[in-house]
């Protein structure tokens, strides 16, 4: 029987996404799977094979007229959910992009493990010839890890463009400050300590495609002495090889909803670097 859900909040990670918005998720605590439709209605749950069988029944009679177009995958940050991209996703859809925000249990697992799940999603994509990405915070680091790998999906799908929103590309000094605060680790998981390790983050290869970094500015944090978005400084967001870097007057948490950022994302996905 179909059951409404929240679409996955810190316990569920996508392993498969369909261009029509349906998805298969795994529960990282109980290890079972479920199939959700585009409205986050659970259609079935059980084993992975059971979910794939139900997915086939769900889509076999549905023609997806977006399957031959570019897919834009939105990857949220630490402690957030795919719902954080609702406004941006709707704007991208309005401009003709097939944008899907994935879910992953960001507070459970390492950066490498999150990259494993993103790689599985990409390997399982059907009917897509080009994929672009918009990431927020931790999502940008996960994508760097994923795109550095030799994966089967690269043989059939071309890179598009990438927009990183407030990425801790050089680690996070603020994460280093709060990682010794036990409640922070309890809430945000071990990934917080990874983000505090500047050298570890720097060792993850740069993005192999055209990308734009959008960083927040003009926020005040007593623990951070240089320009920042309350969590990430401008220098922590930068990459040496990045040709496109802009700032917006926004905080870290809500930068994906900033009108100026949304306009820049849409322009960059369409036209690339100027």
Image (tube, helix red, strand yellow):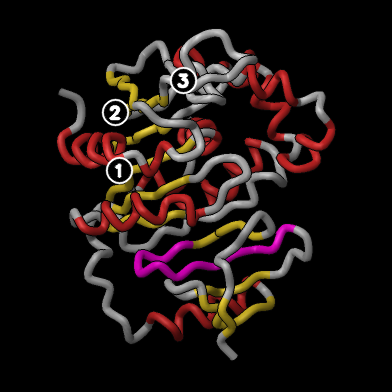
- Check the picture and name the quadrant holding the C terminus: top left
Which residues, given as a range, are shown in magenta?
17-28
Residue 117 in the image, given as x and y percentages of width and height: 58, 50
Horizontal side of residue 209 vs 7, given as left or right: left
Residue positioned 69% across, 44% down in the render: 107
The residue singled out by tag 3 in the image is 237
Of residues 255 and 58, the one drawn nearer to the viewer in this rendering? 255
The residue singled out by tag 1 in the image is 158
User: Where residue 104 is drawn, which disc sits there?
Assistant: none
Classed neighbour count for the residue bearing mark 2: other residues with Cα under 10 Å, few (<14), some (14–19), many (≥20): some
The residue singled out by tag 2 in the image is 210
Question: Could you tell me if residue 94 is visible in this image?
Answer: yes
Q: Does dot 1 land on a helix, a strand or a loop?
A: strand
Residue 139 in the image, given as x and y percentages of width and height: 51, 38
- Check the picture and name the quadrant holding the N terminus: bottom right
Q: Does dot 3 land on a helix, a strand or a loop?
A: helix
Q: Could you tell me how far apart the alpha carbons at marks 3 and 1 are, in whole angstroms?
A: 26 Å
Label 3 or label 1, whichever lies nearer to me, is 3
Classed neighbour count for the residue bearing mark 3: other residues with Cα under 10 Å, few (<14), some (14–19), many (≥20): many
Residue 88 in the image, given as x and y percentages of width and height: 34, 50
Q: Earlier in the sequence, mark 3 or mark 1?
A: 1
Query: Would you say residue 221 sits in the magenta stretch?
Result: no
Residue 249 in the image, given as x and y percentages of width and height: 36, 27
């Amino acid at each position: 029987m179909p059951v409404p859900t929240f679409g996955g909040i810190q316990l569920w990670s996508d392993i498969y996404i369909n261009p029509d918005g349906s998805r298969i998720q795994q529960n990282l605590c109980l290890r079972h799977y479920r199939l959700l439709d585009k409205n986050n209605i659970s259609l079935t749950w059980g084993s992975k094979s059971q979910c794939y069988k139900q997915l086939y029944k769900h889509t076999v009679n549905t023609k997806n007229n977006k399957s031959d177009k570019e897919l834009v995958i939105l990857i949220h940050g630490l402690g957030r959910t795919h719902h954080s991209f609702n406004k941006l996703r709707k704007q991208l859809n309005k401009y003709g992009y097939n944008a899907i925000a994935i879910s992953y249990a960001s507070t459970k697992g390492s950066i490498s493990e999150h990259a494993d799940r993103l790689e599985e999603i990409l390997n399982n994509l059907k009917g897509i010839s080009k994929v672009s990405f918009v990431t927020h915070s931790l999502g940008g680091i996960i994508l760097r890890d994923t795109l550095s790998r030799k994966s089967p999906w690269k043989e059939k799908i071309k890179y598009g463009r990438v927009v990183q929103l407030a990425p801790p590309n050089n680690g996070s000094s603020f994460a280093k400050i709060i990682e010794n605060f036990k409640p922070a680790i309890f809430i945000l998981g071990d990934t917080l300590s990874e983000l505090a390790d500047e050298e570890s983050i720097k060792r993850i290869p740069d993005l192999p495609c055209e990308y734009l970094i959008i960083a927040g500015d003009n926020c005040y944090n007593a623990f951070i002495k240089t320009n920042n978005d309350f969590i990430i400084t401008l220098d922590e967001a930068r990459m040496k090889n990045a040709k496109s870097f802009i700032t917006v007057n926004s905080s870290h948490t809500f930068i994906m909803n900033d009108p100026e950022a949304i306009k820049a994302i849409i322009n960059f996905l369409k036209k690339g670097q100027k």
